[in-house]
Image: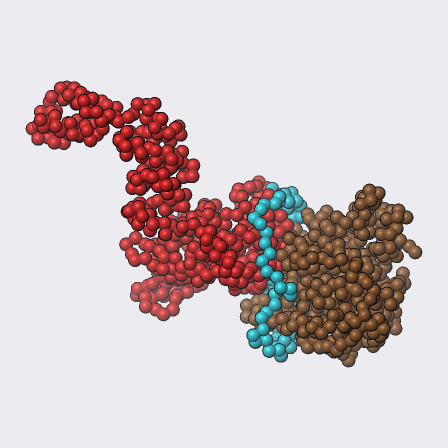
Amino acid sequence: MEIYDLTIHELHDKLKTGEVSAVEATSAMLDRIETVEPQIGSFITVAPEQALADAAAADRRIAAKDIDLLTGIPLALKDIFLTEGIRTTCGSKILNNFVPPYSATSFEKLKQAGAVLLGKLNQDEFAMGSSNESSAYGCTRNPWDQTRIPGGSSGGSAAAIAARQATATLGTDTGGSIRQPASHCGCVGLKPTYGRVSRYGVIAYASSLDQVGPLTRDVTDSAIMLAAVAGHDPKDSTSVDVAVPDYLAALTGTIKGLRIGLPKEYYIAGLDADVQSAMNSAIETYRRLGAEFVDISLPHTDYAVATYYLIATAEASSNLARYDGVRFGHRTENADNLLEMYCKSRSEGFGAEVKRRIMLGTYALSAGYYDAYYVKAQKVRTLIMRDFIQAFEGVDVILTPVAPTPAFRIGEKTNDPLQMYLSDIFTIPVNLAGTCGISVPAGFSADGLPIGLQLIGKPFGEETILRAAHAFEQATDWHMKRAPL
Amino acid sequence: MKITAANVEHVARLARLELSDEEKNLFAGQMDAILAYVEKLKELDTDGVLPTSHAVPMENAFREDVTEPPIGTEKALANSPDRADAFYRVPQIIE
Amino acid sequence: MKFQPVIGLEVHVQLKTNSKIFCGCSTAFGSSPNSQTCPVCLGLPGALPVLNKQVVEFAIKAGLSTNCSITPRSIFARKNYFYPDLPKGYQISQFEEPICQHGWLDIQVEGQDQKRIGITRIHMEEDAGKLVHGEIAGLEKGSGVDLNRACTPLLEVVSDPDLRTSDEAVAYLKQLHQIVTWLGISDGNMEEGSFRCDANVSVMPVGAAQFGTRAEIKNVNSFKFVKQAIEYEIQRQIDLIEDGGTVVQETRLFDPNSGTTRSMRGKEEAHDYRYFPDPDLVPLVIDPAWVERSRSELPELPEKKKQRFMESYSLPAYDADVLTATRALAEYYEECLALQTNPKAASNWIMGEVIRGLNDSGLPIEECPVTPRLLTDLLRLIEEGTISGKIAKKVFDEVWKSGKDPKTIVEEQGLVQVSDSSAIEAIIDDLLAREAGQVAEFRSGKDKLLGFFVGQVMKASKGKANPAVVNDLLLKKLKG
Ligand SMILES: [Mg+2]
Ligand SMILES: [Zn+2]
């Protein structure tokens, strides 16, 4: 087995015994990146010198017997995480030359643990998209079928796992942006409960929905990565001061008696046949493992996409006002006055999807429309949250598909934003409710495209969904399959 | 609800975006379709429902009134597209 | 037609915290440009605000001192607009649920009855940065942006439209200024912009049911300018209406050089601030226990203290007013009283010598070299008859200069008052013998000359003679 095929825990064992050094592991990853990057395009920025220096430092720590689970592990981050001294673009031309003067808390934590940063991963511009096609740096291709999208917005983070370009990655999930690409690329993607991981230093798309989470080869790695980044951060007022449990200890392998809810609104006519059959066999597997199934209802599911697009775009329109060409980022060459400087800098710097969402959000907040759109959406959000609270009175987790179809073709939905938005229908409600969800490989389509299942947990119920996901993984071998590269 | 070119222009101005005529037409149509779709929220009776700003209940996050070191002028200005001395420079503002 | 002006004031009070409202940068005034900044106050991508607790404490105190109710659950909102001094493209402020609401202040304009002015709301917000134009090194063209002031904590105090004259507006402002400085929550420095006022002014025909269209006059930064700006604006609007015109709702700028206001049309644009709750900040919940703790920490407020000074120490209203001009002065006075001195004598000396000394030296009362202890020691020497009032002034100056205690100065310089009649008699006899002509004139009815004789005796005694004894003896000898 190649070094780049190893999971975090497998590589950790080899680093610990000295069988492999961190520099060797990092070099192997950098070689792999060089080999497959022309086909996949997962990265916006590769930082080989920094990576090798990090690796050398990790080797010194290991030699001094100061080894953490992540010491010497080569990771990569979605380009939405601020990395001091390393260019951070958020997939946008407007930040083409932006070199941040500080780092995201989650990146700081990974550095503390001794992890190695390989580089920054491709994504939809400002995390606005479900396909990676809105990136100003070209669309990442799905390693399983290069004519298809990897999913989005953390498309690069998922593709890099599938293409074996990083041992693990971090992404962000606002409406499914970790779980959906994980599903499309056949890896494990976890969206923690809102407030579980600090948002400090993570470029904001929609502040009340954004959450950081890992994309990994298996569930064990997901638990390791979550443990590394979770926890209260005094720099993020919305990060919650709830103790971080031992996620690895939660992976007991047994789920006997676990009550799993199947929401009828998610198993609808029109669901892709391959997705439906993957769900059916997953349900069979869980039954065999001793889980009980309960039919439940999340009655406001059908309103989630509308609610999401009002709240997310409203917050985004305000969050993206700081890209004004004054202190950082792109500034137009053709401005005679202040107003022109603003309008031209922003119009030259932002891509079409970002402009569309800024327009929509500005409209939803503008005088005369605020109550009808924004406040109404916030109220429906309350109803969606209540759906989950009620559902969780009777079940421990909820099992659903991640996406209605496997990865679609590049260019297939670019002219119809509403169709694109509707592809997130199964992931969006989790963000609106603020709770946690995980995407786990659960099969393949007839075309050989990965299909993921989603386990939704109670707020701060990461241990339960990790345990359930891990048990499924033990009973299946979907996560062992390799993309044809 | 029909989004007109004038609506689009007004919103673009608020958002400090300069759109081409092509973009204005495209966005007018797309925003119209999206807003028509979100009209479905009106089906729901939300009288007496409180709006949710934060999905997880939270309150009172504070910092103590203690100064921390600044990042320093050079770091602050390192990414600036245009500067004069230690100021960010912008086109002349007439007051 | 007679017109009734209607005035409402919005005051921005900069709070005296160590660090900014949402980040740890210093709030100190006058540092080099952009040196007191961090990712948060620069509005860098990914940066998040965290509320400075001291700002909340100060806001509650301001609210309680202006008779406001404290909102149990208040929230921060974003006010969205683009301007180069506003790094994030929005100002974090409060909109729908401000921390303080429904308060009032009673104001007093000389010669009029006391009047109650409503306070609509007090909310917390962040300040913007500073723009500079013109003569800056390297700034031959364009404007410069300095974000040191960005994110500095402000309270915005919004009055009801209850004010009717420029005098009322100034009285209200002065009282508000006194309260925030008294509480120690702001330095109130108007020149540095720590206390800034916007005035909403309209006029309506007397007896009309509806207010006229108002103009907002921005950033009027002294009490004098507030008066000028409001008076000019009232007259401008009346003239306009009488000439058949109509007042338009607009923002106007006061020009201190001409004493006029002018339209800011250049910048004018239909504002749509798109306020919405800031998702980066969590609700602020203030329970009754917190409010009560704050209330118990409030100092005695100037109005209360003034009443007490008048009642407990029988001070005239004038004295009580002067002594409660600032909290530090009132505390100085109270420290004197704690040292068992005569209240009226202490008041006289503070209003006279102490304030004169402070004005001459430019020192604040906290740094007055004549401490309450030294002043009361001096007063005691007068009371005991050890020195005369006149000598006491000399001693006061000595204490100011040297910091020595009055008794030592009196002893060292031999300033003890002479009350011994034989010593004074000798001086008088000598004087009367020398000034026989003047004595004759006095005796022929020129009473005014008594002053001349007293002066001469005092001079000869180097001011040490007891004036009462001098008077007595002189009269006896001259008439006798
Ligand atoms: Mg304000
Ligand atoms: Zn700062």
- The answer to whether residue C474 is left or right of residue C318 is left
In the image, farthest residue toward the left? C444
- The answer to whether residue A187 is left or right of residue A299 is right
Is residue A79 depicted above or below C212 in this figure? above
Is residue C24 depicted above or below C415 in this figure? below
Point out residue C269 in the picture as x, y percentages from the top left corner: 52, 61
Q: Residue at x 42, y 56 (%)?
A: C66
Quarter of the image containing the C terminus of chain A?
A: bottom right
Examine the rendering and report whether any part of residue C260 can be seen: no
Q: Quadrant of residue A196?
A: bottom right
Q: Give chain B's shade.
A: cyan
Closest to the observer, A227 or C341: C341
Quarter of the image containing the N terminus of chain A?
A: bottom right
Q: Residue at x 61, y 65 (%)?
A: B53
In the image, farthest residue toward the bottom? A269
Closest to the observer, C375 or C97: C375
Figure chain in brown: A
Q: Residue at x 77, y 59 (%)?
A: A247
Closest to the observer, C308 or A141: C308
Colour basis: by chain
- The answer to whether residue C189 is left or right of residue A395 is left
Is residue A401 depicted above or below A101 in this figure? below
- The answer to whether residue C59 is left or right of residue C382 is right
Figure chain in red: C
Point out residue C22 in the picture as x, y percentages from the top left corner: 58, 52
Examine the rendering and report whether any part of residue C354 can be seen: yes
Point out residue C384 in the picture as x, y percentages from the top left corner: 28, 32
Q: Residue at x 20, y 31 (%)?
A: C468
Point out residue C280 in the picture as x, y percentages from the top left corner: 62, 59
Count all numbered tags in the image, as a single digit. 0
